[in-house]
Image: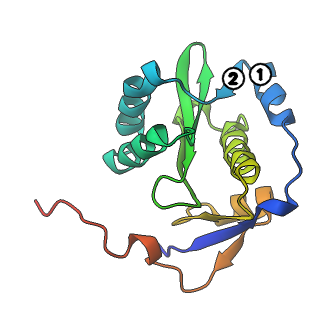
Amino acid sequence: MSHFDMLVKLYDLDLDFSFIEEQKKKGIEIRKPIGPEKSFVLEWIEKQFSIFWRNEADIAFNNNPRSIFIAIKDKSIIGFACYDATVLNFFGPTGVSDKCRGLGTGKALLIACMLDMKLKGYAYAVIGAVGPAEFYKKALGAIEIKDSWPGAYNNMIRNSD
């Protein structure tokens, strides 16, 4: 599997928040979590995805203002997205539970982060170590950054056990 980063022109994004209402019609709330929810959110991320993503989400939780969004359905977390977690100006990680995919929640969380970044003053966003490149191209007009792997992940420490 090849990895690369992608670039998004935030200044081209319309400040369109209709995705929040679209998700609400499906019984899904998109919002930033509050402090008392931190351990629940981080535990869910680790269980659903990985300890790496939990660690990154922990950074996003500690940013001021927080740079993490969650999706909630029936009082349960079904997805999350963060930015400024791996390095500044990077989007990710992000994920939606298997049982809730196909509802547009991943795209809603993505757009929530992108608009938050735009409102903070970022002109561009980097999507690090992209998985679904076509999704990002279609959703945001993201373009591949050539020779960008391993980039910010080049010297990452991993458990050697």
**Mark 2 — residue?**
28
Between residue 58 and residue 26, name the one nearer to us. Answer: 58
Colour style of the rendered protein structure: rainbow
Is 157 drawn above or below residue 65 in the view shown? below
Q: Residue furthest bottom?
A: 147
Q: Disc 1, disc 2: CB below 8 Å?
A: yes
Residue at figure coordinates x 47%, y 37% from the top left: 61
- On screen, residue 149 versus residue 24, left or right, reads left
Is 109 drawn above or below residue 123 in the view shown? above
Q: CA distance from mark 1 to mark 2?
A: 5 Å
Crowd around label 1: few <14 · some 14–19 · many ≥20 (10 Å): some
Residue 147: x and y in percent read 54, 86
The picture quadrant where one finds residue 16 is top right
The amino acid pointed to by label 1 is Lys
The picture quadrant where one finds residue 4 is bottom right
Is 157 drawn above or below residue 75 in the view shown? below
- On screen, residue 40 versus residue 125, left or right, reads left
Disc 2, SS: strand
- On screen, residue 132 versus residue 161, left or right, reads right
Q: Quadrant of the C terminus?
A: bottom left
The picture quadrant where one finds residue 126 is bottom right
Q: How many marks?
A: 2
Where residue 1 is drawn, which disc sits there?
none
Residue 62: x and y in percent read 44, 39
Is 72 drawn above or below residue 151 in the view shown? above
Residue at figure coordinates x 78%, y 30% from the top left: 20
- On screen, residue 145 versus residue 55, left or right, reads right
**Mark 1 — residue?**
24
